[in-house]
Image: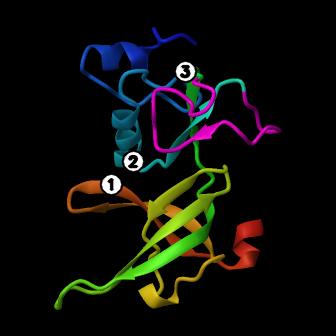
Amino acid sequence: MTTSDPASSAAAQGNARPAPAGMAASVMHPEKDYFAFLAAGRFMLQRRRDSNVFDPGGHVFYPRMAEPGSGETAVDWVEASGLGTVYSTTVIRPRPPAANYNLALIDLAEGVRMTARVDGIAPEGVRIGMAVKARVVRENDQSLVVFEPVDAAQVQA
C-alpha cells in the first residue's frame, strides 16, 4: 500500500476515516484515525509494516506518523490483543463528592505502554503486575480504553 490508499486520500481532503485493519495509517492524521477506531468500538495500534506475527516488535502507541527510533513511516493499523499488565498505579482522590479512581500505566502484550484506568475493582485494589484486559467505553461523549482485571485462566484462553 502507498500513502494514496483511500484512508490517506480521505484524510488529505479533511474527511479522515479509519482505514480497515491491515490498511496503511492515514499519514497526516494518525490521532484522528485512532479516535475514529475507538468511536467504532475498536482498540487498534499501529505496527511497522515489515514486522510480522513472529516478530512482535514494531508496534506503536501513541499514534504517530512514524515509528519512534527507526523513523519508518510504513505503518499499518492492527487490532490490539487487549491483554496487558499493570506497570504502575496511583489512586486519584478528588474532592468529595467525586469518587476516588485510579490511573495506571499498562504494558500491553504488543510491547507498548499506555496510560488508562482500571475498572471493576476498587482503585486501592489495583496492583502492580496485575493482568488486565482492555475494553472500549463511551463516557462524556468520548470513547476511551479502560482495563479490567482478569484471572490467569482467562489470560491464557
Residue nearest the observer in this picture, 18 or 93: 93
Q: Which residues are magenta?
A: 51-71
On residue 143, the disc is 1
Decide which of tag 2 and tag 1 comes sooner along the chain: 2
On residue 38, the disc is 2
* Residue at (42% x, 70% y) in the render: 117
- The vertical placement of 50 against 153, above or below, is above
* Residue at (66% x, 76% y) in the render: 129
Q: Could you say where residue 14 lies in the image, as x and y percent from the top left?
A: 24, 20
The residue to which callout 3 is attached is 73
CB within 8 Å, label 2 to label 1: yes
What is the CA distance from the residue labelled 3 to the residue labelled 2?
22 Å
Q: Quadrant of residue 58?
A: top right
Q: Secondary structure at mark 2?
A: helix
What is the CA distance from the residue labelled 1 to the residue labelled 3?
26 Å
The extreme front residue here reads 69
What amino acid does circle 3 point to? Thr
- The vertical placement of 106 against 68, above or below, is below
What amino acid does circle 2 point to? Leu
Residue 66 located within the stretch drawn in magenta: yes
Q: Residues within 10 Å of mark 2 (few under 14, many from 20)?
A: many
* Residue at (59% x, 71% y) in the render: 86
